[in-house]
Amino acid sequence: MLKVRREFMEHTMMCNYCGKNLEKTIEIKDGENIKHQCPKCGISIIAETGRKECFKCGEDLIEIGKIDDLEKIGIICQDCQERIDKQIKEHLEIVKEGGIYFRCLKCKTSGVIRPHNKICQEVRERLGAPIPEACGIEIKSCYNCEDKSCCKNCEECKE
């Protein structure tokens, strides 16, 4: 009996952000690429079996398992990449005007706090970061993962 060994498996690609199926496929070497997840930043990646550290934060990766034969591989589509690039530019402008970056340690949300918020001035003073220098904070929880009582939905926040 003749054994057939599959060298590569073809996988459909989809956007991680919008979920759209893309017209692209990728061939991944069968059995050598494993799903990993970072326990610190939550990012999921496909890497060779020996990979040890997250490329984003340096934390040790956890092996999740092999890629299923029909599993879709996530990337970022062109439309979402353009939206992300636009948002990064907008955030940079807000920080240059006196805002600050933030990242929530609980739900991993990140973004900017607008300059009119009192916390921006306090953080900049404590860090010794004058405008337009970039700075930011990490917070234990935010309005996305809590009861939303920290934002009164004032007119300034709606802008």
Image: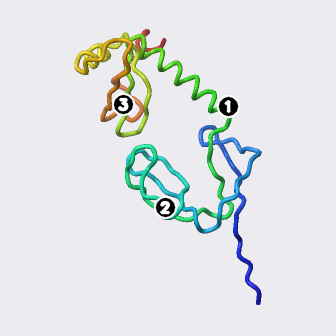
Q: Quadrant of the N terminus?
A: bottom right
Q: Name the residue carrying label 1.
A: 79
Residue drawn at (43%, 31%) of the image: 110
Task: Report the amino acid beneath label 2.
Answer: Ile
Foreground: disc 3 or disc 2? 2
Q: Name the residue carrying label 2.
A: 64
Q: Seen in the image, is 130 located left or right of residue 23? A: left
Q: Which mark is residue 32?
A: none
Q: Secondary structure at mark 1?
A: helix
Q: Seen in the image, is 66 located left or right of residue 145? A: right
Task: Report the amino acid beneath label 1.
Answer: Asp
Judge whether 111 appears above or below 9 on screen. above
> Residue 149 placed where, x, y %?
34, 25
Q: Name the residue carrying label 3.
A: 142
> Residue 148 placed where, x, y %?
38, 27
Give the alpha-carbon distance from disc 3 to disc 1, as whole Å. Answer: 28 Å
Q: Secondary structure at mark 3?
A: loop
